[in-house]
Image: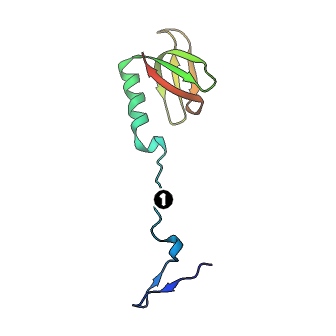
Amino acid sequence: MAFTRRHPAGKKQPPRHFQHQETPQFFPREETGSETAFLKSLVNSHRKVTVVLKNGERLRGHIRYYDRYCFSIGLTARGPRFLIRKDSVSYIAED
């Protein structure tokens, strides 16, 4: 339990170590909308991209589908599609 000091007017004040602390605010990437907008633009434009995974592997193709946790990349127009988890991706670069 934290002790509180009394303000001259009789109001309670929080302990001094809780005052004037600025806590950084970090927003999950899905809450900013920037990731969604980027993936949506790639799906709509059919641009070729290079997806670099955290293990160093590279995949080139078109983003076909995305959701909150993964996306699908088609390596050719009619070829197979791979479902990739977003947490395994290092970055996505447009070609």
Q: Secondary structure at mark 1?
A: loop
Image quadrant of residue 2? bottom right
Q: Position of residue 79 (x, y in %)?
A: 53, 9
Most foreground residue, 17 or 90: 17
Callout 1 crowding tier (Cα within 10 Å): few <14, some 14–19, many ≥20: few
Image quadrant of residue 56? top right
Task: Give the residue drawn at x 47%, y 54%.
Answer: 24
Task: Give the residue drawn at x 39%, y 28%.
Answer: 40
Which residue is identified by label 1?
23
Task: Give the residue drawn at x 49%, y 8%.
Answer: 78
Q: Position of residue 1 (x, y in %)?
A: 63, 78
Query: Does 24 sit above or below residue 14?
Result: above
Most foreground residue, 47 or 66: 47
Most foreground residue, 91 or 19: 19
Three-letter residue code for mark 1: Thr
Number of marks: 1
Task: Give the residue drawn at x 51%, y 27%.
Answer: 91
